[in-house]
Amino acid sequence: MRREADALKEIKGAFGTEAFAEKVFEKVFNEDIRRLVGMKDMWKSRKAPVPLSWGDWDAEGGTPAAVDDQGIWELRENIAVFKDRYQTPDPTVDFPRVFRWELTR
């Protein structure tokens, strides 16, 4: 529990920086997935998820504006939109409410 709180504080500290998107991505799609995969009983009757790494997708190009917002997105399209939204921070934006709630619980 303490490690989780420290990780969230690190993410909060990165808000407004270029590192924010990578930290959120690594926490949600890598570290948390690895932790869940380690719970062997959970995957006896279903396929375990596969962790993703920011570095594996960092070189992926993509034009989020060209993504069909009415279709089913491929993983690369989801990541392109995520990166477009969070990789270039807007310092005038307040810390997102969802993260604020998570960090103050």
Image (cartoon, rainbow, N blue to C red):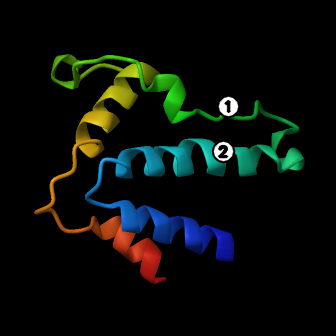
First in sequence: mark 1 vs mark 2: 2
Residue drawn 32% across the image and 35% down it: 83
Identify the secondary structure beneath mark 1.
loop
Indicate the quadrant where residue 68 lies: top left
Q: Which amino acid does label 1 sit on?
A: Val
Mark 1 packing: few (<14 Cα in 10 Å), some, or many (20+)? few
Residue drawn 39% across the image and 18% down it: 60
Rendered position, 68 above or below 29: above
Q: Which amino acid does label 2 sit on?
A: Ile
Indicate the quadrant where residue 88 lies: top left
Percent x, y for residue 12?
39, 67
Percent x, y for residue 40?
88, 45
Q: Do the residues labelled 1 and 2 touch (CB within 8 Å)?
A: yes
Q: Mark 2 points at which residue?
A: 33
Asked whether residue 1 appears in the rendered view, the answer is: no
Residue at the far bottom: name it. 105
From the viewer's side, name the closer residue of 98 and 89: 89
Rendered position, 60 above or below 89: above
Quick check: 8 left or right of 92? right
Residue drawn 39% across the image and 30% down it: 79
Indicate the quadrant where residue 86 lies: top left
Quick check: 96 left or right of 3? left
From the viewer's side, name the closer residue of 61 and 71: 61
Percent x, y for residue 70?
23, 23
Quarter in which the N terminus is drawn: bottom right
Asked whether residue 100 appears in the rendered view, the answer is: yes
Identify the secondary structure beneath mark 2.
helix
Cα–Cα span, label 1 and label 2:
7 Å
Percent x, y for residue 2?
66, 77
Q: Name the residue under label 1.
A: 50
